[in-house]
Image: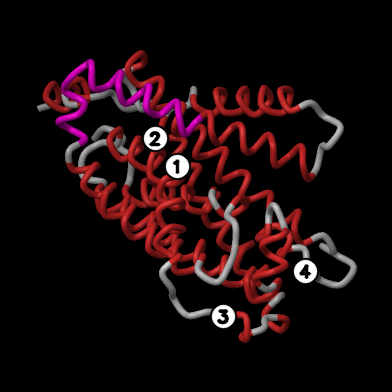
Amino acid sequence: MRERLFPRWGAALFALLPLSELLYLPVDGQTMYAAALASLVCALLCAGGARIAPFWRRYRILQWALALFALWPLTQSLARMGLFLRNTVFPARPLWSLILLLTVCTLLTATTGLNRCAMWALPVAWAAGAVLALSGILTLGELRISYWEAPAAPLLGQAGAILRALLPAALALSLALPDGLAGAASRGLSAGGTLLALLSLRALLLLGPHTAALLPYPNFSAAGLAAIGDFARHGEVFFAVPLLLCELGRCAALACVLLLPVTHSYGVLRLGQEADRPAHRQQ
């Protein structure tokens, strides 16, 4: 029996995508609704993309088009990660050096193959979920329900902005997946989108809409209010590390898609008909 990319790995990989948006997401009264709506639309589109992935892989020109398309969200992720690190942790470092370091880490991870990136996405997603849940619990007593707003028309514009940030990476990965993972893509995006919406609401109820609008990274700042005595006084650091790992996982997976036309491999898996030849030989 040949190795395969298990659905739970694929779901974890797609769950990283909404979580990667959390650090950079602006927060106001409509963000929770917009994040939930954008994640739902993205899940539906990517489930469809995963179903046509076998057709997409038949043609060399479509594989190259997908690789070039994956370059857009990949460079966007590397740039915003480098900018976040310079603005928060390494203000004295030049931006290009941080982006270069992140690029090297991404390529080293991508050389293991898409299936191994997805395998490692599972513990990363669980760790990120656990840290985010703990951060939410620690700040539960400081939430102000009066900041909660009802849905309004501006949420559609925000949902469109979140969808534009989320969809390119998700669509590139869904079109590159092996067969039978459409459900994994939709489940992962739905789970990650739920966390994205809930933590956006947490930031709103902690900071208020006016304070959140003034901060460049409101979810990161809101996490700084969580602490466990003298230990873990800087809750924002414990909050940011798993989210940066999520984004590195996203970058590594996109780099694998970028390399697919050259490597023709998911790592231990071969693309297309080449993957089925060992099974036919055994029969």
Camera-side mark, 3 or 2: 3
**Tag 4: amino acid:** Leu
- Cα separation, mark 2 vs mark 1, equals 6 Å
Kindly report the secondary structure that dominates the magenta region of the rendered protein. helix
Residue under the point 47% across and 53% down: 18
Q: Earlier in the sequence, mark 4 or mark 1?
A: 1
Residue of label 2 = 115
**Tag 1: amino acid:** Met
Residue under the point 86% across and 72% down: 229
Q: Are the residues at dot 1 and dot 3 in contact (C-beta closer than 8 Å)?
A: no
Q: Earlier in the sequence, mark 4 or mark 2?
A: 2
**Tag 2: amino acid:** Asn
- Which stretch is magenta? 53-74
Q: Position of residue 236 (x, y in %)?
A: 75, 58
Q: Earlier in the sequence, mark 3 or mark 2?
A: 2
Compared with 84, 111 (above or below) is: above
Q: Are the residues at dot 2 and dot 1 in contact (C-beta closer than 8 Å)?
A: yes
Residue of label 3 = 148
Foreground pick, 71 / 118: 71
Question: Does 54 appear in magenta?
Answer: yes
Furthest-top residue in this view: 262
Residue of label 1 = 119
- Cα separation, mark 3 vs mark 4, equals 19 Å
Neighbourhood count class around disc 3 (C-alpha, 10 Å): few under 14, some 14–19, many 20 upward: some
Camera-side mark, 4 or 1: 4
Furthest-front residue in this view: 153
Q: Position of residue 7 (x, y in %)?
A: 32, 49
- Cα separation, mark 4 vs mark 1, equals 33 Å
Q: In what quadrant of the picture does the C terminus appear?
A: top left
**Secondary structure of the residue carrying numbered label 4:** loop
Camera-side mark, 3 or 4: 3
